[in-house]
Image: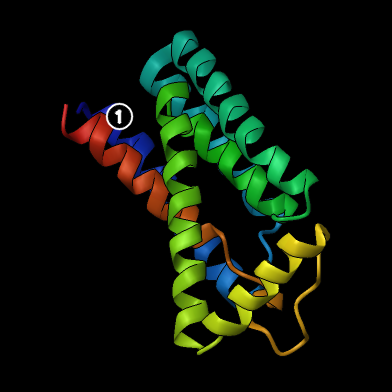
Amino acid sequence: MSMEQLLVVFCLLGLLGAAVAIDVHRHRIPNYLLLTGLLLGILTRAYAGGWSGLAEGGLGLLTGFALFLPMYLLGGMAAGDVKLMGVTGFFLDPYSAMWAAFVSVIAGSLIGLAMIVLCGQLGRTVARYLLMTRARTYLAPEPGDISAQAFPYSIAILVGSLASLYWFHLVR
């Protein structure tokens, strides 16, 4: 990996680290952070790869955004998470952005499941999902349920991005 590519990776990790810190504390990812990250991505991708780097980053942005948009439209994710995945995709190529999104979904599912188990609500959650399956309708979780609380999905995006960087940029 060249020094220019390392600059791109370090900027991405800085953005994701800041997003996780803010998301855990405030349960939102502010637009100023996303715009700053996008600007930083444009500058570093242009420096590292010129016009082709910018084009590849643009395709990565579209890939990350398009893969998370349906989850937002279905009500399972906040808009900031979708935008963060898009900006993350700008730092990656489209193929790496696709895998980062895929691993992020797996990581988010596993983290969510772990939270349900650790809070002792596995039985209640499974019962609610079985009831929803039989009734063929959505049943909102009760106010005390862990599944009713906001989940800082930026953590899962960080994990997915780290996995993608490792497999497609460091191992090659």
Which percent across, then down, holds residue 95?
42, 23
Q: Residue furthest front?
A: 134
Residue 27 appears left or right of 109: right
Count the labels in the image. Answer: 1
Q: Residue at x 40, y 29 (%)?
A: 96
Residue 117 appears left or right of 128: left
The answer to whether residue 16 is visible is no
User: Which quadrant of the rendered structure holds the C terminus?
Assistant: top left
User: Which quadrant of the rendered structure holds the N terminus?
Assistant: top left
* Residue 12 sits in quarter: top left
Q: How is the image coloured?
A: rainbow
Nearer to me, 36 or 138: 138
Residue 163 appears left or right of 42: left
Which percent across, then down, holds residue 167?
24, 36
The answer to whether residue 28 is visible is yes
Which percent across, then down, holds residue 29?
66, 59
Q: Residue at x 16, y 33 (%)?
A: 171
Nearer to me, 42 or 21: 21
The amino acid type found where label 1 is placed reads Gln
Mark 1 surroundings within 10 Å by alpha-carbon count, few (fewer than 14), some (14 through 19), many (20 or more): some
* Residue 168 sits in quarter: top left
Q: Residue at x 74, y 47 (%)?
A: 72
> Badge 1 is on which residue?
5
* Residue 103 sits in quarter: top left
